[in-house]
Image (cartoon, rainbow, N blue to C red):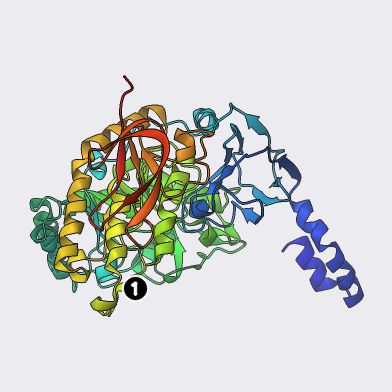
Amino acid sequence: MTLTRYLYNTLTMRNIIFLLLLTPFFSIAQNQYKTEIVLQPNEKWWGGFVGLGHNMPFEKNLELQDLAVQNYNNQNAPLLISSNGRYVWSDDPFKFSIQDNKISLFSDVEELKIVQAGKTLREAFLNASKLYFPSSGKMPEPLFFSVPQYNTWIELMYNQNQEDILKYAHNVKEHNFPEGVFMIDDNWQKHYGNFEFKPEKFPDPKAMIRQLHQMGFKIMLWVCPFVSADSPEYRDLEERGFLIKTKGKSIPAMIEWWNGFSASYDLTNPKAVEYFKSQLRTLQDEYGVDGFKFDAGDMQYFNGEYSLFEKDASAVDLSKKWAEIGLDFPYNEYRASWKMGGTELVQRLGDKDYSWAALQSLIPQAATAGLLGYSYICPDMIGGGNYKAFTNIDQTKLDQELIIRSAQVQAMMPMMQFSVAPWRILSADNLKIASTIARFHKTMGNYILQVAQQTATTGEPMLRNMEYSFPHQGFAECKDQFMLGTKYLVAPMVNKGTERSVKIPKGRWKDDQGKIVKGPKVLEIKVPLDRLPYYEKLEEN
Protein backbone atom coordinates (compact mmCIF):
# COMPACT_ATOMS: atom_id res chain seq x y z
CA MET A 1 0.00 0.00 0.00
CA THR A 2 1.40 3.41 -0.94
CA LEU A 3 1.77 6.21 1.61
CA THR A 4 -0.86 8.29 -0.16
CA ARG A 5 -3.41 5.44 -0.11
CA TYR A 6 -2.69 4.71 3.57
CA LEU A 7 -3.35 8.29 4.52
CA TYR A 8 -6.56 8.37 2.49
CA ASN A 9 -7.78 5.33 4.40
CA THR A 10 -6.93 6.58 7.87
CA LEU A 11 -7.27 10.35 8.07
CA THR A 12 -10.33 12.48 8.78
CA MET A 13 -12.23 14.18 5.95
CA ARG A 14 -10.60 17.52 6.79
CA ASN A 15 -7.17 15.96 6.55
CA ILE A 16 -8.14 14.19 3.33
CA ILE A 17 -9.04 17.55 1.78
CA PHE A 18 -5.68 18.90 2.90
CA LEU A 19 -3.96 15.82 1.51
CA LEU A 20 -5.60 16.33 -1.89
CA LEU A 21 -3.75 19.62 -2.12
CA LEU A 22 -0.50 17.78 -1.46
CA THR A 23 -1.09 14.94 -3.94
CA PRO A 24 1.02 16.57 -6.68
CA PHE A 25 3.88 16.74 -4.17
CA PHE A 26 3.69 13.00 -3.51
CA SER A 27 3.63 12.26 -7.27
CA ILE A 28 6.73 14.33 -7.87
CA ALA A 29 8.49 13.04 -4.78
CA GLN A 30 8.28 9.49 -6.09
CA ASN A 31 10.45 10.64 -9.03
CA GLN A 32 13.53 11.60 -7.07
CA TYR A 33 15.46 13.11 -9.95
CA LYS A 34 14.20 15.61 -12.52
CA THR A 35 16.13 16.78 -15.57
CA GLU A 36 15.03 19.31 -18.17
CA ILE A 37 16.16 19.59 -21.78
CA VAL A 38 15.60 22.89 -23.56
CA LEU A 39 14.98 22.17 -27.23
CA GLN A 40 17.47 23.71 -29.63
CA PRO A 41 16.34 25.51 -32.81
CA ASN A 42 14.97 22.98 -35.35
CA GLU A 43 15.84 20.09 -33.02
CA LYS A 44 13.64 16.98 -33.26
CA TRP A 45 13.42 14.02 -30.87
CA TRP A 46 12.52 10.35 -31.20
CA GLY A 47 12.56 7.41 -28.82
CA GLY A 48 11.14 5.47 -25.91
CA PHE A 49 8.26 3.69 -27.60
CA VAL A 50 8.17 2.02 -31.02
CA GLY A 51 4.37 2.09 -30.74
CA LEU A 52 4.41 5.90 -30.72
CA GLY A 53 6.66 6.12 -33.77
CA HIS A 54 3.89 7.62 -35.90
CA ASN A 55 3.87 10.59 -33.49
CA MET A 56 7.60 11.15 -33.97
CA PRO A 57 9.48 13.32 -34.14
CA PHE A 58 7.64 14.35 -31.00
CA GLU A 59 5.50 17.46 -31.11
CA LYS A 60 6.18 20.32 -28.73
CA ASN A 61 3.47 19.05 -26.38
CA LEU A 62 3.46 15.46 -25.17
CA GLU A 63 1.73 14.20 -22.06
CA LEU A 64 3.70 12.31 -19.43
CA GLN A 65 4.90 8.92 -20.69
CA ASP A 66 6.09 6.16 -18.35
CA LEU A 67 8.43 3.53 -19.78
CA ALA A 68 7.87 1.29 -16.75
CA VAL A 69 4.15 0.67 -17.13
CA GLN A 70 3.19 0.97 -20.81
CA ASN A 71 4.59 -0.28 -24.11
CA TYR A 72 1.86 0.64 -26.61
CA ASN A 73 1.72 -2.95 -27.83
CA ASN A 74 5.35 -2.88 -28.96
CA GLN A 75 9.02 -2.57 -28.07
CA ASN A 76 10.40 -0.06 -25.53
CA ALA A 77 13.90 1.23 -24.83
CA PRO A 78 15.15 3.78 -22.28
CA LEU A 79 16.55 6.03 -25.03
CA LEU A 80 15.62 9.46 -26.36
CA ILE A 81 17.57 10.62 -29.39
CA SER A 82 17.87 13.95 -31.21
CA SER A 83 18.44 15.18 -34.75
CA ASN A 84 21.11 17.49 -33.31
CA GLY A 85 23.30 14.64 -32.05
CA ARG A 86 22.05 14.54 -28.46
CA TYR A 87 20.62 11.60 -26.55
CA VAL A 88 19.50 10.41 -23.12
CA TRP A 89 19.98 6.84 -21.91
CA SER A 90 19.22 5.13 -18.62
CA ASP A 91 19.51 1.50 -17.63
CA ASP A 92 16.18 1.90 -15.85
CA PRO A 93 12.75 3.09 -17.00
CA PHE A 94 12.02 6.78 -16.72
CA LYS A 95 9.16 9.17 -17.41
CA PHE A 96 9.18 12.08 -19.80
CA SER A 97 6.93 14.79 -21.15
CA ILE A 98 7.29 17.70 -23.57
CA GLN A 99 5.81 21.12 -22.98
CA ASP A 100 6.74 24.72 -23.73
CA ASN A 101 9.76 23.77 -25.85
CA LYS A 102 11.18 21.68 -23.03
CA ILE A 103 11.53 17.95 -22.31
CA SER A 104 11.07 17.04 -18.65
CA LEU A 105 12.65 13.77 -17.52
CA PHE A 106 11.87 11.98 -14.24
CA SER A 107 13.85 9.08 -12.78
CA ASP A 108 13.58 7.20 -9.51
CA VAL A 109 17.21 6.07 -9.55
CA GLU A 110 19.52 8.64 -11.12
CA GLU A 111 19.92 12.11 -12.53
CA LEU A 112 19.57 11.63 -16.26
CA LYS A 113 22.31 13.13 -18.39
CA ILE A 114 22.11 14.65 -21.85
CA VAL A 115 24.97 13.41 -24.01
CA GLN A 116 26.22 15.45 -26.97
CA ALA A 117 27.57 12.80 -29.33
CA GLY A 118 27.82 14.79 -32.52
CA LYS A 119 25.60 16.94 -34.69
CA THR A 120 23.28 14.40 -36.32
CA LEU A 121 20.74 11.71 -35.53
CA ARG A 122 23.09 9.06 -36.89
CA GLU A 123 26.00 10.22 -34.73
CA ALA A 124 23.80 10.13 -31.64
CA PHE A 125 22.58 6.62 -32.52
CA LEU A 126 26.05 5.24 -33.20
CA ASN A 127 27.37 6.56 -29.90
CA ALA A 128 24.43 5.28 -27.85
CA SER A 129 24.30 1.89 -29.55
CA LYS A 130 28.03 1.29 -29.16
CA LEU A 131 27.83 1.97 -25.42
CA TYR A 132 24.46 0.51 -24.45
CA PHE A 133 23.12 -1.91 -27.08
CA PRO A 134 25.96 -2.98 -29.39
CA SER A 135 25.19 -5.54 -32.03
CA SER A 136 25.56 -9.11 -30.82
CA GLY A 137 27.23 -9.92 -34.13
CA LYS A 138 24.41 -12.34 -34.85
CA MET A 139 21.14 -12.14 -36.78
CA PRO A 140 17.93 -14.17 -36.94
CA GLU A 141 17.58 -17.05 -39.38
CA PRO A 142 18.58 -15.68 -42.86
CA LEU A 143 15.40 -17.05 -44.46
CA PHE A 144 13.40 -14.28 -42.74
CA PHE A 145 14.97 -11.73 -45.07
CA SER A 146 14.32 -13.43 -48.38
CA VAL A 147 10.81 -14.90 -48.30
CA PRO A 148 7.40 -13.81 -46.98
CA GLN A 149 5.87 -15.03 -43.76
CA TYR A 150 2.38 -16.50 -43.54
CA ASN A 151 0.50 -16.30 -40.25
CA THR A 152 -2.75 -18.20 -39.71
CA TRP A 153 -4.29 -15.73 -37.24
CA ILE A 154 -6.69 -13.78 -39.46
CA GLU A 155 -8.00 -16.83 -41.30
CA LEU A 156 -8.33 -19.24 -38.38
CA MET A 157 -8.23 -17.10 -35.22
CA TYR A 158 -8.76 -19.48 -32.27
CA ASN A 159 -9.76 -22.34 -34.56
CA GLN A 160 -6.26 -23.48 -35.47
CA ASN A 161 -6.61 -26.89 -37.08
CA GLN A 162 -4.71 -29.25 -39.32
CA GLU A 163 -7.10 -29.30 -42.28
CA ASP A 164 -7.31 -25.52 -42.70
CA ILE A 165 -3.60 -24.98 -42.09
CA LEU A 166 -2.74 -27.35 -44.93
CA LYS A 167 -5.39 -25.71 -47.10
CA TYR A 168 -3.81 -22.28 -46.48
CA ALA A 169 -0.36 -23.61 -47.40
CA HIS A 170 -1.64 -25.24 -50.60
CA ASN A 171 -3.30 -21.95 -51.57
CA VAL A 172 0.01 -20.12 -51.15
CA LYS A 173 1.55 -22.34 -53.81
CA GLU A 174 -1.50 -22.56 -56.08
CA HIS A 175 -1.74 -18.77 -56.32
CA ASN A 176 1.94 -18.30 -57.16
CA PHE A 177 3.14 -16.89 -53.86
CA PRO A 178 6.63 -17.89 -52.66
CA GLU A 179 6.96 -20.52 -49.97
CA GLY A 180 8.20 -19.00 -46.74
CA VAL A 181 7.98 -19.03 -42.96
CA PHE A 182 4.64 -20.44 -41.80
CA MET A 183 3.33 -19.40 -38.37
CA ILE A 184 0.61 -21.40 -36.62
CA ASP A 185 -0.98 -18.96 -34.20
CA ASP A 186 -2.73 -19.06 -30.83
CA ASN A 187 -4.82 -22.03 -29.64
CA TRP A 188 -3.10 -24.94 -31.36
CA GLN A 189 -2.29 -26.39 -27.93
CA LYS A 190 -4.60 -28.02 -25.40
CA HIS A 191 -4.34 -25.02 -23.07
CA TYR A 192 -1.81 -22.39 -22.04
CA GLY A 193 1.27 -23.91 -20.49
CA ASN A 194 0.67 -27.13 -22.40
CA PHE A 195 2.75 -28.00 -25.48
CA GLU A 196 0.68 -30.73 -27.09
CA PHE A 197 -1.46 -30.26 -30.19
CA LYS A 198 -5.19 -30.53 -29.61
CA PRO A 199 -5.97 -34.08 -30.79
CA GLU A 200 -9.48 -33.13 -31.95
CA LYS A 201 -8.03 -30.38 -34.17
CA PHE A 202 -4.76 -32.03 -35.18
CA PRO A 203 -5.22 -35.77 -35.80
CA ASP A 204 -1.62 -36.16 -37.01
CA PRO A 205 0.52 -33.05 -36.32
CA LYS A 206 3.76 -34.84 -37.22
CA ALA A 207 2.41 -35.65 -40.67
CA MET A 208 1.13 -32.07 -41.04
CA ILE A 209 4.51 -30.53 -40.27
CA ARG A 210 6.28 -33.07 -42.44
CA GLN A 211 4.00 -32.18 -45.33
CA LEU A 212 4.52 -28.43 -44.79
CA HIS A 213 8.27 -28.97 -44.84
CA GLN A 214 8.00 -30.96 -48.06
CA MET A 215 6.08 -28.04 -49.57
CA GLY A 216 8.99 -25.71 -48.74
CA PHE A 217 7.81 -24.02 -45.55
CA LYS A 218 9.53 -23.53 -42.20
CA ILE A 219 7.17 -23.87 -39.24
CA MET A 220 6.79 -21.66 -36.16
CA LEU A 221 4.32 -22.09 -33.30
CA TRP A 222 2.74 -19.39 -31.13
CA VAL A 223 3.74 -19.58 -27.44
CA CYS A 224 3.29 -17.41 -24.35
CA PRO A 225 4.53 -17.38 -20.72
CA PHE A 226 1.06 -17.99 -19.27
CA VAL A 227 -0.35 -21.18 -17.76
CA SER A 228 -4.04 -22.06 -17.55
CA ALA A 229 -5.27 -22.33 -13.98
CA ASP A 230 -6.23 -25.72 -12.57
CA SER A 231 -4.45 -27.61 -15.34
CA PRO A 232 -1.99 -30.47 -14.84
CA GLU A 233 0.81 -28.13 -15.91
CA TYR A 234 -0.29 -25.50 -13.40
CA ARG A 235 -0.16 -27.99 -10.53
CA ASP A 236 3.19 -29.36 -11.66
CA LEU A 237 4.76 -25.91 -12.08
CA GLU A 238 3.36 -24.72 -8.75
CA GLU A 239 4.95 -27.69 -7.02
CA ARG A 240 8.27 -26.94 -8.70
CA GLY A 241 8.06 -23.29 -7.59
CA PHE A 242 8.21 -22.05 -11.19
CA LEU A 243 5.18 -19.72 -11.13
CA ILE A 244 4.87 -16.07 -10.13
CA LYS A 245 3.31 -15.82 -6.67
CA THR A 246 1.07 -13.16 -5.19
CA LYS A 247 3.07 -10.96 -2.85
CA GLY A 248 2.80 -12.15 0.76
CA LYS A 249 1.13 -15.41 -0.25
CA SER A 250 2.27 -18.86 -1.27
CA ILE A 251 -0.21 -19.26 -4.12
CA PRO A 252 0.43 -18.37 -7.78
CA ALA A 253 -0.83 -14.98 -8.93
CA MET A 254 -3.70 -14.87 -11.38
CA ILE A 255 -2.69 -12.33 -14.02
CA GLU A 256 -5.17 -10.68 -16.37
CA TRP A 257 -4.17 -10.53 -20.05
CA TRP A 258 -6.14 -10.48 -23.32
CA ASN A 259 -7.15 -14.15 -23.01
CA GLY A 260 -8.47 -13.88 -19.44
CA PHE A 261 -6.73 -14.77 -16.17
CA SER A 262 -3.77 -17.14 -16.00
CA ALA A 263 -0.74 -17.98 -13.95
CA SER A 264 2.67 -17.21 -15.42
CA TYR A 265 6.14 -18.65 -15.41
CA ASP A 266 8.44 -16.79 -13.03
CA LEU A 267 10.91 -15.71 -15.69
CA THR A 268 13.35 -14.46 -13.06
CA ASN A 269 13.89 -18.06 -11.95
CA PRO A 270 16.67 -19.59 -14.12
CA LYS A 271 15.39 -23.11 -13.49
CA ALA A 272 11.89 -22.12 -14.61
CA VAL A 273 13.28 -20.54 -17.78
CA GLU A 274 15.38 -23.56 -18.57
CA TYR A 275 12.39 -25.83 -18.00
CA PHE A 276 10.30 -23.71 -20.38
CA LYS A 277 13.02 -23.86 -23.04
CA SER A 278 13.25 -27.61 -22.60
CA GLN A 279 9.55 -27.87 -23.45
CA LEU A 280 10.18 -25.94 -26.66
CA ARG A 281 13.14 -28.13 -27.59
CA THR A 282 10.97 -31.20 -27.06
CA LEU A 283 8.49 -29.74 -29.54
CA GLN A 284 11.30 -29.30 -32.02
CA ASP A 285 12.60 -32.82 -31.51
CA GLU A 286 9.21 -34.54 -31.54
CA TYR A 287 7.42 -32.65 -34.30
CA GLY A 288 10.18 -30.98 -36.33
CA VAL A 289 9.05 -27.45 -35.41
CA ASP A 290 11.58 -24.84 -36.57
CA GLY A 291 10.88 -22.02 -34.12
CA PHE A 292 8.42 -19.95 -32.15
CA LYS A 293 6.37 -16.78 -32.13
CA PHE A 294 6.87 -15.53 -28.57
CA ASP A 295 3.84 -13.43 -27.65
CA ALA A 296 2.36 -11.69 -24.60
CA GLY A 297 5.51 -10.42 -22.93
CA ASP A 298 4.02 -6.95 -22.44
CA MET A 299 5.18 -5.27 -19.27
CA GLN A 300 1.75 -3.90 -18.36
CA TYR A 301 0.54 -7.44 -17.63
CA PHE A 302 3.18 -7.78 -14.91
CA ASN A 303 2.64 -4.58 -12.94
CA GLY A 304 1.00 -6.25 -9.94
CA GLU A 305 2.60 -6.92 -6.58
CA TYR A 306 4.35 -10.28 -6.77
CA SER A 307 6.81 -12.50 -5.00
CA LEU A 308 9.49 -13.35 -7.55
CA PHE A 309 12.59 -15.52 -7.44
CA GLU A 310 14.56 -12.33 -8.13
CA LYS A 311 13.22 -10.18 -5.33
CA ASP A 312 13.96 -6.78 -6.86
CA ALA A 313 12.78 -7.63 -10.37
CA SER A 314 10.16 -5.42 -12.00
CA ALA A 315 7.71 -5.67 -14.88
CA VAL A 316 10.32 -4.54 -17.41
CA ASP A 317 12.69 -7.22 -16.13
CA LEU A 318 10.07 -9.90 -16.77
CA SER A 319 9.51 -8.54 -20.28
CA LYS A 320 13.24 -8.57 -20.97
CA LYS A 321 13.74 -12.08 -19.64
CA TRP A 322 10.87 -13.30 -21.83
CA ALA A 323 12.63 -11.82 -24.86
CA GLU A 324 15.97 -13.37 -23.92
CA ILE A 325 14.47 -16.85 -24.34
CA GLY A 326 14.25 -16.23 -28.08
CA LEU A 327 18.01 -15.89 -28.35
CA ASP A 328 18.19 -19.69 -28.15
CA PHE A 329 15.92 -20.10 -31.19
CA PRO A 330 17.01 -18.58 -34.55
CA TYR A 331 13.42 -18.79 -35.84
CA ASN A 332 11.81 -16.34 -33.42
CA GLU A 333 9.41 -13.41 -33.36
CA TYR A 334 8.53 -10.84 -30.69
CA ARG A 335 6.09 -7.95 -30.53
CA ALA A 336 6.99 -6.68 -27.04
CA SER A 337 10.52 -6.19 -25.74
CA TRP A 338 12.42 -4.11 -23.23
CA LYS A 339 16.05 -3.09 -23.78
CA MET A 340 16.80 -5.80 -26.35
CA GLY A 341 18.39 -3.56 -29.00
CA GLY A 342 21.28 -5.07 -30.91
CA THR A 343 20.16 -8.66 -30.40
CA GLU A 344 19.28 -11.23 -33.05
CA LEU A 345 15.51 -11.15 -32.51
CA VAL A 346 12.76 -10.60 -35.06
CA GLN A 347 10.66 -7.71 -33.76
CA ARG A 348 7.18 -7.33 -35.23
CA LEU A 349 5.19 -4.12 -35.14
CA GLY A 350 2.02 -4.33 -33.08
CA ASP A 351 -1.37 -5.30 -34.52
CA LYS A 352 -2.82 -2.56 -36.71
CA ASP A 353 -6.36 -1.69 -37.71
CA TYR A 354 -7.56 -2.15 -41.25
CA SER A 355 -7.29 1.52 -42.24
CA TRP A 356 -5.21 4.00 -44.18
CA ALA A 357 -4.21 5.70 -40.94
CA ALA A 358 -2.80 2.40 -39.67
CA LEU A 359 -0.96 1.87 -42.94
CA GLN A 360 0.58 5.33 -42.60
CA SER A 361 1.99 4.37 -39.19
CA LEU A 362 4.12 1.48 -40.53
CA ILE A 363 7.04 3.48 -41.90
CA PRO A 364 7.57 5.85 -38.93
CA GLN A 365 7.15 3.03 -36.41
CA ALA A 366 9.56 0.74 -38.26
CA ALA A 367 12.05 3.62 -38.52
CA THR A 368 11.71 4.29 -34.79
CA ALA A 369 12.35 0.62 -34.07
CA GLY A 370 15.66 0.95 -35.90
CA LEU A 371 16.60 4.02 -33.88
CA LEU A 372 16.04 2.01 -30.67
CA GLY A 373 18.22 -0.86 -31.84
CA TYR A 374 15.41 -3.17 -33.00
CA SER A 375 16.71 -3.49 -36.53
CA TYR A 376 15.30 -6.85 -37.61
CA ILE A 377 11.83 -5.43 -37.95
CA CYS A 378 8.74 -7.08 -39.40
CA PRO A 379 5.69 -4.91 -40.08
CA ASP A 380 2.29 -6.02 -38.93
CA MET A 381 0.25 -8.43 -41.03
CA ILE A 382 -0.60 -7.09 -44.49
CA GLY A 383 -3.93 -5.27 -44.22
CA GLY A 384 -3.66 -5.22 -40.43
CA GLY A 385 -4.02 -7.69 -37.59
CA ASN A 386 -7.63 -6.88 -36.71
CA TYR A 387 -9.46 -10.09 -37.61
CA LYS A 388 -12.89 -8.47 -37.22
CA ALA A 389 -12.24 -6.40 -40.34
CA PHE A 390 -12.07 -9.58 -42.44
CA THR A 391 -14.78 -11.68 -40.79
CA ASN A 392 -18.10 -12.17 -42.61
CA ILE A 393 -17.19 -9.42 -45.06
CA ASP A 394 -18.88 -8.33 -48.26
CA GLN A 395 -15.96 -8.57 -50.66
CA THR A 396 -17.48 -5.91 -52.93
CA LYS A 397 -17.17 -3.37 -50.10
CA LEU A 398 -13.60 -4.23 -49.14
CA ASP A 399 -11.00 -1.62 -50.04
CA GLN A 400 -8.70 -3.83 -52.07
CA GLU A 401 -6.47 -0.85 -52.86
CA LEU A 402 -5.56 -0.70 -49.17
CA ILE A 403 -4.47 -4.36 -49.20
CA ILE A 404 -2.27 -3.88 -52.26
CA ARG A 405 -0.66 -0.71 -50.91
CA SER A 406 -0.07 -2.45 -47.58
CA ALA A 407 1.79 -5.24 -49.37
CA GLN A 408 3.83 -2.70 -51.35
CA VAL A 409 4.87 -0.85 -48.19
CA GLN A 410 6.26 -4.12 -46.84
CA ALA A 411 7.88 -5.40 -50.03
CA MET A 412 11.14 -3.50 -49.47
CA MET A 413 11.13 -3.68 -45.69
CA PRO A 414 13.35 -6.25 -43.97
CA MET A 415 10.40 -8.66 -43.80
CA MET A 416 6.80 -8.96 -44.96
CA GLN A 417 3.97 -10.99 -43.42
CA PHE A 418 0.66 -12.17 -44.87
CA SER A 419 -2.24 -13.35 -42.73
CA VAL A 420 -5.57 -12.54 -44.34
CA ALA A 421 -5.62 -14.77 -47.41
CA PRO A 422 -5.19 -12.61 -50.53
CA TRP A 423 -6.99 -15.24 -52.64
CA ARG A 424 -10.07 -14.90 -50.41
CA ILE A 425 -10.45 -11.13 -50.50
CA LEU A 426 -8.91 -9.89 -53.76
CA SER A 427 -10.14 -9.85 -57.33
CA ALA A 428 -8.25 -11.93 -59.89
CA ASP A 429 -6.37 -8.88 -61.18
CA ASN A 430 -5.45 -7.62 -57.73
CA LEU A 431 -4.44 -11.11 -56.65
CA LYS A 432 -1.89 -11.15 -59.49
CA ILE A 433 -0.53 -7.81 -58.25
CA ALA A 434 -0.22 -9.17 -54.70
CA SER A 435 1.56 -12.29 -55.96
CA THR A 436 3.96 -10.14 -58.00
CA ILE A 437 4.70 -8.01 -54.93
CA ALA A 438 5.47 -11.10 -52.83
CA ARG A 439 7.80 -12.46 -55.51
CA PHE A 440 9.48 -9.04 -55.83
CA HIS A 441 10.26 -9.18 -52.10
CA LYS A 442 11.92 -12.54 -52.70
CA THR A 443 13.86 -11.05 -55.62
CA MET A 444 15.12 -8.33 -53.26
CA GLY A 445 16.08 -11.01 -50.75
CA ASN A 446 19.79 -11.13 -51.53
CA TYR A 447 20.18 -7.40 -50.98
CA ILE A 448 17.98 -7.41 -47.86
CA LEU A 449 20.08 -10.24 -46.45
CA GLN A 450 23.27 -8.27 -47.18
CA VAL A 451 21.84 -5.34 -45.23
CA ALA A 452 20.97 -7.66 -42.33
CA GLN A 453 24.52 -9.00 -42.33
CA GLN A 454 25.90 -5.45 -42.28
CA THR A 455 23.60 -4.63 -39.38
CA ALA A 456 24.91 -7.61 -37.44
CA THR A 457 28.39 -6.09 -37.86
CA THR A 458 27.76 -2.35 -37.47
CA GLY A 459 24.50 -2.22 -35.50
CA GLU A 460 23.04 0.35 -37.90
CA PRO A 461 19.33 0.02 -38.72
CA MET A 462 18.27 -1.94 -41.77
CA LEU A 463 15.29 0.33 -42.38
CA ARG A 464 16.45 3.89 -41.89
CA ASN A 465 14.72 7.10 -41.00
CA MET A 466 15.28 9.67 -43.78
CA GLU A 467 16.74 12.17 -41.29
CA TYR A 468 19.18 9.47 -40.19
CA SER A 469 20.48 9.00 -43.73
CA PHE A 470 20.29 12.64 -44.89
CA PRO A 471 20.74 14.88 -41.85
CA HIS A 472 19.65 18.50 -41.86
CA GLN A 473 18.30 18.32 -45.42
CA GLY A 474 14.64 18.80 -44.52
CA PHE A 475 13.69 15.16 -43.90
CA ALA A 476 13.01 15.26 -40.14
CA GLU A 477 9.22 15.23 -40.63
CA CYS A 478 9.24 12.74 -43.53
CA LYS A 479 7.06 9.75 -42.63
CA ASP A 480 6.21 8.27 -46.03
CA GLN A 481 9.71 7.45 -47.31
CA PHE A 482 12.54 5.35 -45.92
CA MET A 483 15.96 4.01 -46.82
CA LEU A 484 16.65 0.29 -47.06
CA GLY A 485 20.31 0.22 -46.16
CA THR A 486 22.29 2.82 -48.08
CA LYS A 487 21.19 1.88 -51.59
CA TYR A 488 17.42 2.20 -51.93
CA LEU A 489 15.06 5.06 -51.20
CA VAL A 490 11.53 3.62 -50.98
CA ALA A 491 8.47 5.83 -51.47
CA PRO A 492 5.32 3.64 -51.44
CA MET A 493 1.76 4.90 -51.55
CA VAL A 494 0.31 5.26 -48.05
CA ASN A 495 -2.72 7.32 -49.08
CA LYS A 496 -5.63 6.43 -51.30
CA GLY A 497 -5.02 7.54 -54.87
CA THR A 498 -2.46 7.31 -57.65
CA GLU A 499 -0.28 10.41 -57.19
CA ARG A 500 2.28 11.42 -54.62
CA SER A 501 5.27 13.69 -53.99
CA VAL A 502 8.73 12.22 -53.49
CA LYS A 503 11.56 14.21 -51.99
CA ILE A 504 14.87 13.20 -53.57
CA PRO A 505 18.11 13.90 -51.66
CA LYS A 506 21.36 15.07 -53.23
CA GLY A 507 23.00 12.79 -55.76
CA ARG A 508 22.01 10.69 -58.76
CA TRP A 509 19.20 8.16 -58.45
CA LYS A 510 17.57 5.64 -60.79
CA ASP A 511 13.87 4.98 -60.22
CA ASP A 512 11.94 1.74 -60.57
CA GLN A 513 11.15 2.61 -64.20
CA GLY A 514 14.79 3.19 -65.13
CA LYS A 515 14.70 7.00 -65.18
CA ILE A 516 17.69 8.94 -63.82
CA VAL A 517 16.92 11.68 -61.32
CA LYS A 518 19.36 14.23 -59.91
CA GLY A 519 18.63 15.62 -56.47
CA PRO A 520 17.84 17.50 -54.46
CA LYS A 521 14.38 17.97 -55.87
CA VAL A 522 10.75 17.17 -55.23
CA LEU A 523 9.01 14.98 -57.79
CA GLU A 524 5.31 14.66 -58.48
CA ILE A 525 4.79 11.11 -59.74
CA LYS A 526 2.00 8.87 -60.98
CA VAL A 527 1.58 5.65 -59.01
CA PRO A 528 -0.90 3.22 -60.55
CA LEU A 529 -1.97 0.36 -58.33
CA ASP A 530 0.67 -2.00 -59.66
CA ARG A 531 3.61 0.38 -59.06
CA LEU A 532 5.93 0.55 -56.05
CA PRO A 533 8.16 3.62 -56.46
CA TYR A 534 11.77 3.25 -55.33
CA TYR A 535 15.07 4.92 -56.20
CA GLU A 536 18.49 3.30 -56.38
CA LYS A 537 21.44 5.45 -55.32
CA LEU A 538 24.00 5.65 -58.12
CA GLU A 539 27.70 6.08 -57.65
CA GLU A 540 28.94 9.56 -58.45
CA ASN A 541 31.25 9.85 -61.46
Q: Residue at x 75, y 43 (%)?
A: 33
Residue at the farthest top position:
541
Q: Is residue 342 left or right of residue 8?
A: left
Type of amino acid at the residue the image marks with label 1: Ala
Residue wearing tag 1:
389
Q: Give the residue drawn at x 54%, y 49%.
A: 56
Q: Nearer the viewer, residue 57 or 303?
A: 57
The percent position of residue 417, horizontal first and vertical second, equals 28, 55
Q: Does the rendering let one see residue 322?
A: no
Depth check, front residue: 323 or 198: 323
Is residue 11 rendered to the left or right of residue 151? right
Q: Position of residue 382 (x, y in %)?
A: 30, 59
Q: Picture coordinates of residue 254 (x, y %)?
A: 50, 68
Q: Secondary structure at mark 1?
A: helix
Report x, y in % for residue 79.
Answer: 57, 41
In this view of the protein, can residue 264 be seen by the observer? yes
- Relative to residue 39, is residue 137 drawn left or right? left
Residue 22 position (above or below residue 48): below
Asked whether, in this view, residue 498 is left or right of residue 337, the answer is: left
Few, some or many residues within 10 Å of mark 1 (<14, 14–19, 20+): some
How many numbered marks does the figure carry? 1
Q: Residue at x 20, y 68 (%)?
A: 426
Residue 205, picture quadrant: bottom left
* Residue 451 occupies quadrant: top left
Position of the C terminus, as image quadrant, is top left
- 231 is higher (above) or lower (below) than 437: below
Q: In this rendering, is residue 164 above or below 111? A: below
